[in-house]
Amino acid sequence: MATVTEAWIRIEGWLHHYTPRSGAVLAGPAAPELIEAAEVQAGVAFPAELVESLLRHDGLTEPANIFPEATPLAVEEIGEQYAIRMDVAPDVDGFAVHAPNAEPWWHERWLPFGDAGCGLQVIDMRPGPGRGRVGLAPTSNPADFTEGWPSLSAYLTAVAVALETGGTVGEWHAYVADDDTLWWDLAGRTEVNGRPLRAVSALQGGGQFAAGRDA
């Protein structure tokens, strides 16, 4: 498994080669002092892998379908989303676990990584064997880590491998739109919003972009 930085380098290389318009929206590195300020605001130390990712890219410069499950958040957005959840949770009984769910709606030791539109992709910082795993905290339901990833580096590596080989990230397949942007969707899609899509698995030389690289 690649480190966060190694995975990002692979993702960047693929984006700039096949979908340059998507590669262009990756933001530059976050300022360390902004990361420190966000940690103070949340009262939770950011995990090393999240810091490593933010020091590579502080989110995106504009909305884009870079990842299959959620748009990566910038440092300030992480702080904002965390504060919103912490403010709302007490009013909706959001810290409590109700059977048969094993997770609450929110926990003070979860850090947002991505905006999924209908929820947040979060990193679990609770002590124990699940520490560092990535899951989804929906807007209207309890959180779910059952189909998540054991770490941020594992998730980013899975994205890199899927792009390089035409594989999948969970149920999500990568496509290239006719405007040279990346799009993630379910299997068998041929268009989005009336625009044609090409499956990454069908690209010329598909699966050979990173031949010889270790997953």
Image: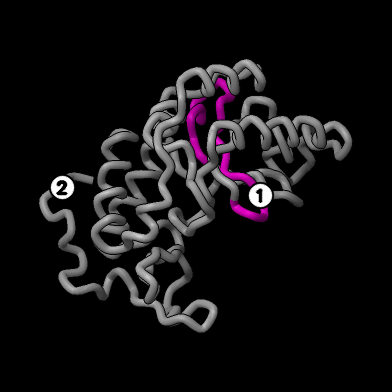
The answer, for residue 148, to whether it is visible in the render is no
Tell me the tag on residue 59.
none
Colouring convention used in this rendered image of the protein: one colour
Q: List x then y, in percent, for residue 114.
A: 55, 44
Toward the left, the furthest residue is 212
- Determine if the magenta segment contains residue 127: yes
Q: Which residues are magenta?
A: 116-134
Q: Amino acid at mark 2?
A: Arg
Instruction: Look at the numbered disc 1 and give the secondary structure of its residue.
Output: strand
Depth check: 135 or 43 in front? 43
Q: Is residue 61 left or right of residue 77?
A: left
Hey, what amino acid is under mark 1?
Answer: Gly
How far apart are the alpha carbons under marks 1 and 2? 33 Å
Q: Work out whether 175 lies above or below 47.
A: below
Tag 2 residue: 213
Kindly identify which residue carries mark 1.
119
| Vertical order, 214 against 39 (above or below) | below
